[in-house]
Image (cartoon, rainbow, N blue to C red):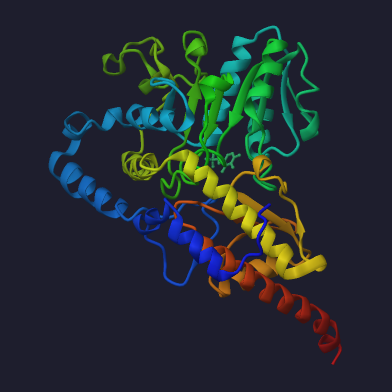
């Protein structure tokens, strides 16, 4: 919580002092739009179109198939992985870019279950992204194990010696609740279980220290706060200590120790490259690299400070401007326990999100009654917090008023 009442003037003053303010101009955002959905699809870095254009017109057109070597296309999954490692607090060689988050999750879960042969359970919690739970269910089924889903607050208490791997999202995609990684890793290791963390809503908006925190395995998304573009490939992390033992259950030619020997038998690469499967999407990797390079220019501690300040100011404004009949806030009120988003609940959430968008504020509806506002600190400014909260108040009152008159007019 912040102490002083917010006005547009003092929020503008924060923008003038903001050491990250210049990053906003490195993104190409539509005019008259406040984009609070960067946790779903990150904004476009200004440099991305020209870089893709170059790769298409120069490398692809002129050098054709030789580009794989001449322009190091084959190295991209690893090269970008090593850059992402810096964002995650991981070592070189522990991160690779490939496929989607869901597919990487499947590879790692099955790999973990195969490694932990005597144990029967994947443990997760009910607030986890449903897609992650589906994948876990199918991984459990493929390996003849079971998925146990518990209440979020019980996750650590439910750990026991039958748990092969505990899997959770660092930031809850609905509420923005932020999980502290290290205590979960310590408790899991105390019963001999592995820890797999989904970083889709945390990578790029806060400093991470996967190595220090003892995380074994992780996955995350390239198109959210990493600004890699629609459908950007995802990343995966395997702690060095597991790299000699964990296997990729999908034996693809690109994960082979001698990719171009085309041997009859599969032999896994000794590095994290064994988690590659097939031909990488070069244009998407190039777009992702632009997003990552831009992010690497920013101090992630400053990004986190601004993220907490933006979400705290937004929550303060909802209370300050609405008083007691404001919307229900689902996100943790303590900034230390919150990712870079604020979720509120309203029975007419979907109509409000539509009205917001007609008024230039892009937020996201999550069924049945949640509105999610994501704050990407590199391109959302403090004045946006004022403007969006004012527009939210106005359209909510309008939608509420329309609802009250709607039944009467319907009868006429
Ligand atoms: C966005 C998101 C994903 C995305 O998965 P894809 O397979 O890349 O579509 C997965 N998990 C979580 C927690 C997410 O927020």
Q: Which x, y percent locates residue 78?
A: 35, 26
Q: Which corner quadrant of the image does residue 372 belong to?
A: bottom right
Determine the residue positioned at 32% across, 29% down.
79
48 with respect to 201 (left or right): left
Q: Which x, y percent locates residue 119?
A: 71, 11
Determine the residue positioned at 68% across, 59% down.
316
Q: Considering the image in quadrants, where does the C terminus appear?
A: bottom right
Q: Which x, y percent locates residue 299?
A: 42, 40
18 with respect to 282 (left or right): right
State the residue in front, 378 or 250. Answer: 378
Q: Which corner quadrant of the image does residue 62 belong to?
A: top left
Furthest-front residue in this view? 4
In the displayed structure, would residue 168 be above or below residue 50?
above
In the displayed structure, would residue 109 be above or below residue 129?
above
Q: Which corner quadrant of the image does residue 44 belong to?
A: bottom left
Q: Quadrant of ligand 1?
A: top right
Answer yes or no: is residue 346 visible: yes
Furthest-bottom residue in this view? 412
Determine the residue positioned at 64% across, 53% down.
312
Q: Which x, y percent locates residue 346?
A: 76, 63
Furthest-left residue in this view? 62
Q: How many marks?
A: 0
Determine the residue positioned at 36% across, 59% down.
25
Answer yes or no: is residue 98 visible: no
State the residue in front, 393 or 223. Answer: 393
State the residue in front, 329 or 322. Answer: 322
């Amino acid at each position: 919580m912040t102490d002083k009442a917010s006005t547009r003037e003092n929020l503008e003053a924060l923008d003038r002092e903001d050491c990250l303010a210049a990053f906003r101009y490195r993104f190409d955002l539509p005019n008259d739009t406040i984009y609070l959905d960067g946790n779903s699809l990150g904004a476009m870095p200004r440099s991305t179109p020209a870089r893709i254009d170059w790769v298409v017109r120069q490398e692809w057109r002129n050098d054709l198939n030789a580009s794989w070597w001449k322009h190091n296309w084959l190295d991209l999954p690893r090269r970008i992985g090593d850059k992402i490692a810096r964002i995650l607090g991981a070592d070189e060689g522990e991160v690779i870019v490939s496929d989607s988050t869901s597919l990487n999750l499947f590879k790692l879960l099955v790999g973990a279950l195969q490694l932990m042969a005597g144990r029967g359970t994947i443990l997760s919690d009910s607030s986890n992204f449903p897609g992650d739970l589906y994948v876990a269910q199918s991984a459990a089924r493929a390996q003849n194990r079971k998925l146990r889903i518990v209440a979020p607050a019980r996750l650590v208490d439910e750990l026991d010696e039958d748990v092969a791997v505990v899997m959770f999202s660092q930031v809850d995609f609905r509420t923005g609740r932020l999980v502290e990684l290290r205590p979960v890793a310590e408790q899991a290791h105390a019963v001999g279980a592995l820890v797999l963390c989904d970083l889709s809503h945390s990578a790029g908006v806060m400093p991470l220290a996967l190595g220090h925190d003892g995380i074994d395995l992780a996955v995350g998304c390239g198109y959210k706060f990493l600004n890699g573009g629609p459908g950007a490939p995802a990343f995966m992390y395997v702690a060095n200590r597991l790299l000699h033992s964990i296997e990729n259950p999908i034996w693809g030619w690109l994960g082979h120790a001698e990719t171009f020997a085309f041997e009859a038998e599969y032999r896994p690469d000794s590095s994290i490259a064994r988690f590659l499967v097939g031909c990488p999407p070069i244009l998407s990797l190039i777009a992702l690299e632009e997003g990552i390079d831009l992010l690497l220019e920013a101090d992630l501690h400053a990004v986190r400070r601004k993220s907490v300040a933006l979400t705290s100011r937004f929550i303060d404004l909802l209370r300050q401007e609405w008083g007691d009949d404001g919307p229900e806030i689902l996100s943790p009120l303590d900034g230390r326990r919150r990712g870079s988003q604020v979720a509120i609940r309203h029975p007419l959430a979907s109509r409000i999100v539509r009205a917001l968008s007609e008024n230039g504020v892009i937020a996201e509806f999550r069924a049945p009654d949640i509105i999610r506002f994501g704050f990407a600190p590199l391109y959302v400014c403090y004045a946006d917090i004022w403007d969006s909260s004012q527009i939210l108040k106005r359209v909510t009152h309008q939608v509420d008023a329309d609802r009250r008159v709607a039944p009467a007019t319907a009868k006429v």
